[in-house]
Amino acid sequence: MGKACPEDLLLIGKVVRPHGLKGLLRIISYADSPATFLKAGEVVLGGGSGKPEKYGIISITAGKKFFLLHLEGLDSLEKAEACRGENIYLNKAVLTKGEDEYYWYELVGLPVFLDTGKRIGTIRRIIPGAGHDIYVVREGIEEVLIPAVREVIKEVDLEKGKVIISEMEGLLDLNEV
């Protein structure tokens, strides 16, 4: 269906296996809602056995632990089986976000500073939580878990490439006895 430029793509899920006989794919989604896929209108499958290819989205429905994705051109069990294990990507340009919202790919790798200017480390990964995410910030062998809440995160400056936090009592006192 067409090719895509890798730096424009965001990993959004993975094909687990075919579902049924008509080309449906059972997928693990890294997005909270099927609406993310529907807004995009198309996905890129790749990273498994085949070369990356674009597919239009016909439908997507949410199950309890998986989504069922129906793509243009996949109309048989055989065609769906060929997609087993493929990564699913969306074009970053189709994603929308509100004010003070950030995608994980924008945050991972950013340095974190206290509002006093002291460097804490770099965001290495993000742990999803029920109420809020947790930023895993590492400097050398030191690792700090920073709650992604307004009381702590004072500024995310993507243009300058940094995150500024204010210290809450006990937040950075991990190594004190």
Image (tube, helix red, strand yellow):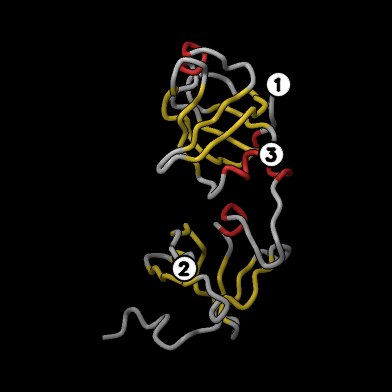
Indicate the amino acid at tag 2. Gly
Quarter location, residue 90: top right
Indicate the amino acid at tag 1. Gly
Residue lying at 64% horizontally and 29% vertically, measured from the top left: 57
Residue lying at 58% horizontally and 59% vertically, measured from the top left: 107
Please tell me how crowded label 1 is: few (under 14), some (14-19), or many (20+) other residues with Cα within 10 Å: few
Q: CA distance from mark 2 to mark 3?
A: 27 Å
Q: CA distance from mark 2 to mark 1?
A: 39 Å
Q: CA distance from mark 3 to mark 1?
A: 15 Å
Numbered label attached to residue 40: 3
Instruction: Read off the residue under disc 2.
Output: 131
Observer able to see residue 8 = no
Of all residues, the one furthest to the left in this rendering is 177
Indicate the amino acid at tag 3. Ala
Q: Position of residue 106 (x, y in %)?
A: 62, 56
Residue lying at 66% horizontally and 64% vertically, measured from the top left: 161
Q: Is residue 27 above or below residue 48?
A: below
2 or 3: tag closer to the N-terminus: 3
* 172 to the left or right of 60: left
Q: Position of residue 1 (x, y in %)?
A: 69, 19
Numbered label attached to residue 2: 1
Quarter location, residue 4: top right
Residue lying at 61% horizontally and 55% vertically, measured from the top left: 103
